[in-house]
Image: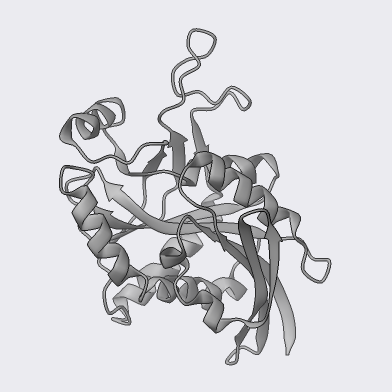
């Protein structure tokens, strides 16, 4: 059996990683303060391929996510660095067409709480002079198409439709209409909001590592968000591995 790739998979919470660790072989644990990182092999018996997976859950927020991403990228397995970084988990919908269990694989992300005015325009990341970070178009299309095929083949027990578009990141849990409407006014085309993705994307971008985000809608970022989020999370932990497995099963078909 041959070795193929080294993939980094990061989430904010253990429920978003789900049963990933149970599906890896020869798992090793690395501890950095209060952050545990796990590394093991996932075996594709059909294609006879070993994929090295390094994974962790960071905790909520941009700082925790950026710290975990940096630590993750610093770990080399068999002296092979991580070739692409995937951040996966849940998000609150801004687009009214989105429902719980719908999936977003964004083609761009932004930090919508970034504001360094008057030195920089609002939402510009000063170190990059960019408002949006674009994922690699071929990588995003591959992830989108792989998940879409999985949904069309009716393999999904829970998941809904799949979308692309913009995801916004900030150190805020959005749970009221006023905040939600304020974001929509600034970003009318934004699909959803969360608290980590664009921070991880910035680390990956600056480290010159390809990255993608995969987010599943947990709530509508309104007054029902807290209850819907908590109820959803318990259920999501049982199915989050399904999306990760789709990516691993198809990763031999993409070059990056």
Write the residue at 47% across / 43% down: 61
Look at 60% across and 92% down and name the residue there: 45
Q: Quadrant of residue 253 in the image?
A: bottom right
Indicate left or right for 227 with 207 as reference. Answer: left
Q: Is residue 52 visible?
A: no
**Left or right position of 206 against 94:** right
Q: Is residue 160 above or below residue 120?
A: below
Q: How is the image coloured?
A: one colour
**Rendered-image quadrant of the C terminus:** bottom right
Residue 228 visible in this rendered orientation of the protein? yes
Please state the horizontal and vertical placement of residue 168, each as a whole percent of the image: 39, 39
The spot of residue 179 in percent (x, y) is 24, 31
From the top left corner, tell me how far across and down residue 130 is, in percent. Answer: 54, 27
Q: Quadrant of residue 125?
A: top right
Q: Residue furthest front?
A: 33
Front in this rendered view, residue 159 or 22: 22
Look at the picture and state if 134 lies above or below 183. Answer: below
Give the residue drawn at x 46%, y 20%: 115
Could you tell whether 53 is left or right of 250 in the image? Answer: right
Between residue 174 and residue 211, name the one nearer to us: 174
Residue 244 image point, x, y percent: 48, 71
Q: Is residue 226 left or right of residue 51?
A: left
């Amino acid at each position: 059996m041959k070795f193929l790739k080294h993939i980094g998979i990061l989430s904010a919470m253990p429920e978003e990683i789900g049963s990933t660790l149970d599906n890896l072989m020869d798992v090793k644990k690395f501890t950095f303060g209060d952050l545990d990182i796990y590394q093991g092999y996932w075996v594709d018996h059909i294609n006879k391929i070993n994929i090295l997976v390094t994974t962790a859950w960071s905790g909520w927020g941009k700082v925790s996510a950026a710290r975990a991403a940096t630590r993750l990228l610093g770990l080399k397995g068999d002296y092979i660095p991580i070739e692409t970084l995937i951040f996966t988990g849940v998000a609150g919908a801004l687009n009214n067409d989105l429902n719980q269990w719908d999936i977003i694989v964004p083609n761009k992300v932004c930090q919508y709480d970034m504001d360094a005015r008057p030195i920089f325009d609002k939402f510009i990341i000063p170190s990059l002079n960019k408002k949006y970070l674009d994922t690699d178009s071929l990588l995003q299309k591959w992830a989108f198409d792989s998940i879409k095929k999985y949904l069309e083949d009716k393999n999904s027990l829970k998941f809904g439709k799949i979308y692309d578009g913009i995801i916004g990141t900030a150190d805020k849990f959005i749970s009221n209409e006023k905040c939600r409407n304020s974001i929509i006014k600034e970003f009318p085309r934004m699909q959803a909001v969360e608290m980590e993705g664009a921070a991880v994307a910035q680390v990956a971008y600056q480290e010159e590592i390809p990255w993608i985000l995969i987010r599943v809608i947990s709530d509508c970022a309104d007054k029902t968000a807290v209850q819907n989020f908590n109820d959803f999370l318990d259920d999501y932990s049982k199915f989050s591995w399904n999306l990760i497995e789709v990516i691993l099963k198809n990763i031999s078909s993409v070059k990056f």
